[in-house]
Image (cartoon, rainbow, N blue to C red):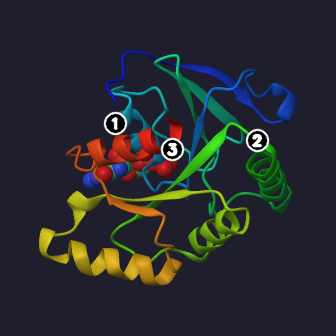
Amino acid sequence: MKVTSSEIVISAVRPEQYPEGDLPEIALAGRSNVGKSSLINKLLNRKSLARISSKPGKTQTLNFYLINEVMHFVDVPGYGYAKVSKKEREAWGKMIETYITTRENLRAVILIIDVRHDPTSDDEMMYHFLKHYEIPAIVVATKADKIPKGKWQKHLKAVKEKLQLEKTDSLILFSSETGQGKDEVWSTIKNYIS
Ligand code: GDP
């Protein structure tokens, strides 16, 4: 998709704050520091719309971005950051659960993982949570530029096995540094929003 406009419309916590209307939504989730902001900025051709986080785990709101007036991206705050209190963690869990389980506009979740490492237990939990609620997942393995090309397939295979990736879910190799995988992510998104 050629992105001609993107803007933040609201930072929401509760359902009554979600944007009105029936535009399709794609949510983006991943552990803190995985490269989610960089991926959003890359997909939207923006330098710093989704702020590249200096303090991981800080944002505890769902940030809705309107794209080309036809869809929303929903930036989900990163998980797995050690310095977050139990109370904050619970609030996060509740916010995500409410959003995922009640939002009719939601078409798929992009789950971002680091291609260099096996998915963490939090990543596994998030994937299985999505599968439990039958939400399509697009797994994006980012930071591909950080490992040699010859190792890509081995790492992707490990991700598939660890997550027990369902056949209908995509796994896309990505790099915010080089732009690799950008077209594939967009064409996959397009399948879910049209
Ligand atoms: P977030 O916390 O998930 O939003 O992660 P950020 O987008 O802030 O990225 C965390 C760090 O990883 C930053 O220093 C980024 O520059 C770096 N980073 C993110 N994506 C990539 C990538 O694809 N390749 C490389 N080499 N670095 C990346």
- Residue 176 visible in rendering: no
Q: Residues within 10 Å of mark 2 (few under 14, many from 20)?
A: few
Q: Residues within 10 Å of mark 3 (few under 14, many from 20)?
A: some
Q: Is mark 1 within 8 Å of ligand 1?
A: yes
Q: Which mark is residue 42?
A: 1
Left or right: residue 59 versus residue 159 is right
Left or right: residue 10 versus residue 91 is left
Q: To which quarter of the image does residue 8 belong?
A: top right
> Is disc 1 placed on a helix, strand or loop?
helix
Across and down, in percent, residue 24 comes to 60, 33
Left or right: residue 52 versus residue 181 is right
Q: To which quarter of the image does residue 143 belong?
A: bottom left
Across and down, in percent, residue 172 comes to 34, 59
**Mark toward the start of the polypeptide (2 vs 3):** 2
Q: Residue furthest front?
A: 194
Residue type at numbered disc 1: Lys
What's the CA distance linking mark 1 and mark 3? 20 Å
Q: Which mark is residue 158?
A: none
Between residues 70 and 14, which one lies in front from this camera angle? 70
Q: What residue does disc 2 label?
A: 103
Badge nearest the viewer, 1 or 2:
2
**Mark toward the start of the polypeptide (1 vs 2):** 1
What's the CA distance linking mark 1 and mark 2? 26 Å
What's the CA distance linking mark 2 and mark 3? 15 Å
Tag count: 3
Residue at 57%, 49% in the rendered image: 108
Residue type at numbered disc 3: Tyr
Residue type at numbered disc 2: Arg
> Is disc 2 placed on a helix, strand or loop?
loop
